[in-house]
Image (cartoon, helix red, strand yellow):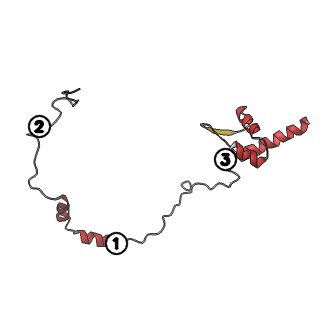
Amino acid sequence: MRGQDLNLRPSGYEASDATLQTGSSSINPSESLDALRGHSASAMQAASSQHENFGQPVVSDSAVVPRQEADDERPLTPAQAAARFQIPEYLLRKACTEDRLEHLRIVNAIWLSPPAVAVFVLSWRAQNRRDS
């Protein structure tokens, strides 16, 4: 690789020296802004300190504010659902595998809706009473 030109731009891409224009004088950009506007930095700082006490922002659109969910509505893992509804965890996992229980699978995690688990538990207990 030694000695190779790795510049892949086509020749003639760069502007020639004849088309480049040089500045007429060297001026510090910050000095030129003050000269054009007629304002000094101290006057700008004094003007900006006039508006410093603002209140909290007001959000009027209810769609922007996230809905606060009650603890009973938050999705549960199978272990949490098994503890809350006093049912074996393997039954919940088996019901999810057989599509008998509404669930959300994200990668390897299973999330269960508490109302869906409650309905499943009621039907499972009713089935067990009939069978015994």
The 10 Å Cα crowd at callout 1, few under 14, some 14 to 19, many 20 or more, is few
Secondary structure of the residue carrying numbered label 2: loop
The 10 Å Cα crowd at callout 3, few under 14, some 14 to 19, many 20 or more, is some
What residue is pinned by disc 1?
A: 49
Secondary structure of the residue carrying numbered label 3: loop
Q: Is residue 125 above or below residue 53?
A: above
Q: Is residue 124 above or below residue 59?
A: above
The span from disc 1 to disc 2 (Cα, nearest Å) is 49 Å
Residue depicted at x 52% and y 61%: 59
The span from disc 2 to disc 3 (Cα, nearest Å) is 66 Å
What residue is pinned by disc 3?
A: 75
> Which residue is farthest right?
132
Left or right position of 53 against 45? right
The span from disc 3 to disc 1 (Cα, nearest Å) is 49 Å
Residue 110 position, x and y percent, is 66, 40
Left or right position of 118 against 13? right
Residue 128 position, x and y percent, is 87, 38
Task: Please name which of the two marks, 2 or 3, marks the residue nearer to the observer.
Answer: 3
* Quadrant position of residue 28: bottom left
- Quick one: label 3 or label 1, which is nearer the N terminus? 1
- Quick one: label 1 or label 2, which is nearer the N terminus? 2
Q: Amino acid at mark 3?
A: Pro
Left or right position of 109 against 101? left
* Quadrant position of residue 106: top right
Disc sitting over residue 16 in the figure: 2
Residue depicted at x 68% and y 54%: 71
Secondary structure of the residue carrying numbered label 1: loop
Q: Are the residues at dot 1 and dot 2 in contact (C-beta closer than 8 Å)?
A: no
Closest to the observer: 33 or 3?
Answer: 3
